[in-house]
Amino acid sequence: MLTGIAAAFFYLFAFITVASAFMVIAARNPVHSVLFLILAFFNAAGLFLLTGAEFLAMILLVVYVGAVAVLFLFVVMMLDVDFAELKSGALQYAPIGALVGLILAAELIIVLGGSVFAPKLGTVAFQPTPDVATRTNTAALGDILYTDYIYFFQIAGLVLLVAMIGAIVLTLRHKPNIKRQNVSEQVARTPATAIEVKQVETGKGLTEVS
């Protein structure tokens, strides 16, 4: 009975996740797209819980839903983006998008069909799962990330850093009549240019206000 309930919840979470992911790219309103993305994250966390990966489920809720998705929502709502003008030139990128979609579809078919053509390939390609009684899934995940694939983890962090800097540069807007800090100009200042001495005549200076 428990297996049947778990299978029912799995198909429920999986269906809502796929439907929400489709609505992320199909919704016309970008705010609605972000809300559907949050719904997809919640259901993906439920799938992680069903597979016993409670640490990944909590990370998905705390990091992605609590920080990243909410940040996306605030950015979309605050940016004054003309989406009609943005979508007008989207057709010229349709061939590249179709090519990327075909590559992703081919990779998914290879991964999903690998178990049919080579059933023993999964036991060779993946590391053995440690015993839960001796090693928790959180500790095993830490061993994989920070020991076996530490260089790939650092490269992923570098890519995210570059993406963050690129997003800041693309959204930076310079408004006129606003004083901004110029570090090179400040460093190049000399005492002659930094201090200006005024000769004030007697009796014509500032008077103290009581």
Image: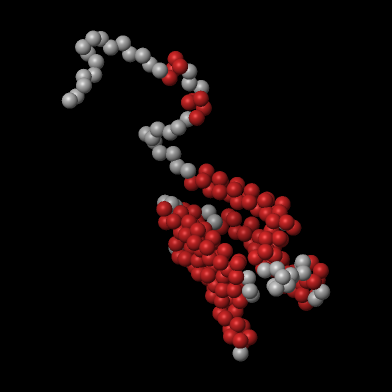
Q: Is residue 18 visible?
A: no
- Nearer to us in this view, 135 or 162: 135
Q: Is residue 132 visible?
A: yes
Residue 177 position within the rendered picture, expressed as x and y whole percent measured from the top left: 37, 34
User: Which residue shows up at 21% across the image and 21% down it?
Assistant: 208
Say if 91 sits above or below 173 in the image.
below
Residue 34 position within the rendered picture, expressed as x and y whole percent measured from the top left: 48, 63
Residue 108 position within the rendered picture, expressed as x and y whole percent measured from the top left: 70, 68
Total number of numbered discs in the rendering: 0
* Residue sticking out furthest to the front: 134
Q: Quadrant of the N terminus?
A: bottom right
Left/right placement of residue 88 relative to residue 133 reads left
Q: Quadrant of the C terminus?
A: top left
User: Which residue shows up at 67% across the image and 64% down it?
Assistant: 139
- Nearer to us in this view, 106 or 147: 147
User: Which residue shows up at 63% across the image and 70% down it?
Assistant: 53
* Residue sticking out furthest to the bottom: 1
